[in-house]
Amino acid sequence: MPSICPYFQVHQPLRIKRYRVFDVGHDHSYFDDESDSNLNNRKVLAKVAEKSYLPANELILKLLRKYPQFRVSYSFSGVILEQLEKYLPKVLSSFKKLVNTGRVEILSETYYHSLAFFYSLGEFESQVSQHREKVEKIFGVKPKVFRNTELAYSNELAKWADRKGYKAILAEGWDSFLGWRSPNFLYRPKGTNKIKLMLKNYKLSDDIAFRFSEQTWSQWPLTADKFASWVSNINGNGQVVNLFMDYETFGEHQWADKGIFEFLENLPKELIKHPDNDFVTPSEAVKRYQVMDEVDVPFIVTWADSERDLSAWVGNAIQTSAIDFIYKMENGIKNTSNKRLLNDWRRLQTSDHFYYMCTKWYSDGDVHKYFNPYESPYDAFISYMNAASDLKLRMEKSGKKSTSYA
């Protein structure tokens, strides 16, 4: 019997404004929440909430009430939770209503949606702890399952999560390490003792997230009954079908007038028509199913573009120079004991900043262009490095510059 596990990532970054070299040393506000430009984070969030979050939450709540077996899970970056608290409390309240049903699970991640695990374990752990506290404060729950930023995963991350007591960790079910094995089973990460690995069924997930409104796709139009038949065909050859995607899929990446909300509304009904199908949260899947095999992932795998690696964030010289620059400031920033400096430094770690500097062609680039406000990757790089340079000056002027900073 395949259980269906829908998981949605909810995140919007604080985009850096057009920060000029002339601003360095004078303007210490790096993020735009007030101007009329397309860099205004407040306006972007309001637009996404109106098109996606609010109608999707209303529909999910309707489905939870209509179908007792229906389940979903979410992961929120701390960055978006802060923005919702400040600007759109009604949206945050709508998410709370979902969690209060008892059939919605909240996952653990980095607070600043960063790649810190691969650059500073101490900073990574601080962000995970900060995120856990934020989730507990807002939703009253303690996350038991971990997902890293952009599903960036490796054996070492799984070992860390295992030591920290997480029940499961999420990753992309990519062919490079799965080989003949199916993503529709639970696995044991190499080198771990108890934690279970849940893998995204990228083919079925991406049918919704990326191909739903693509009229040149051979399976267009995608209907709920057609999709349910694909899931039901897994009966006898899978435990759980993990449908992992950005929440903005509903209403933003795939617009309402393309029928995405009607598809979502009809999907639970069509899926449970098969008597062997049901829904689970990640924690429920862990309790119900045993691991089928050990999986070895010695390299980094993500859910981004055709390569499924970190090259979308650190694949060119401007990206690596930017991310190296910001992480080299860690000791100096922390030695200042200045909370504002620390917060700005962490906000500059958000992975989206480096994604906007990507110069390669990538297959899912079109949906990400919705949220990229820069004219070019170099435009993003210039604003970022100017802001980061100003932060470095502020750190140095604090009088507590770390002697280890290079």
Image (spheres, rainbow, N blue to C red):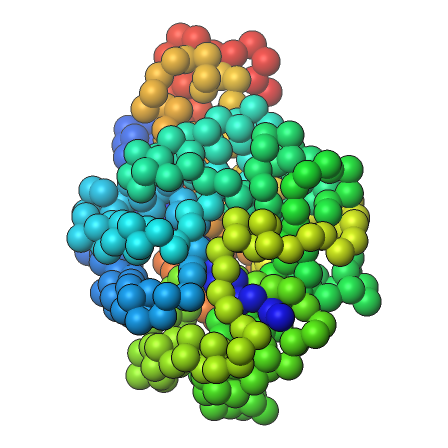
* 313 left or right of 224 in image: right
* 212 left or right of 136 in image: right
Residue at the limit of the structure toward the front, as seen here: 275
The quarter of the image holding the C terminus is top right
Residue 129 percent location from the top left of the image: 46, 29
Q: Nearer the viewer, residue 3 or 245?
A: 3
Q: Nearer the viewer, residue 197 or 127?
A: 197
Whether residue 317 is visible to the viewer of this picture, yes or no, is no
Residue 7 percent location from the top left of the image: 48, 59
Residue at 31%, 42% in the rendered image: 139
Residue 372 sits above or below residue 25 on the image: below
Q: Nearer the viewer, residue 391 or 364?
A: 364
Residue at the limit of the structure toward the right, as seen here: 180
Residue 178 sits above or below residue 366 on the image: above
Residue at 42%, 75% in the rendered image: 268
Residue at 35%, 17% in the rendered image: 338
Residue 102 percent location from the top left of the image: 35, 51
The quarter of the image holding the N terminus is bottom right
Q: Nearer the viewer, residue 119 or 233?
A: 233
Residue at 46%, 40% in the rendered image: 143
Which quadrant would residue 266 be assigned to in this image?
Answer: bottom left
* 48 left or right of 186 in image: left
* 51 left or right of 13 in image: left
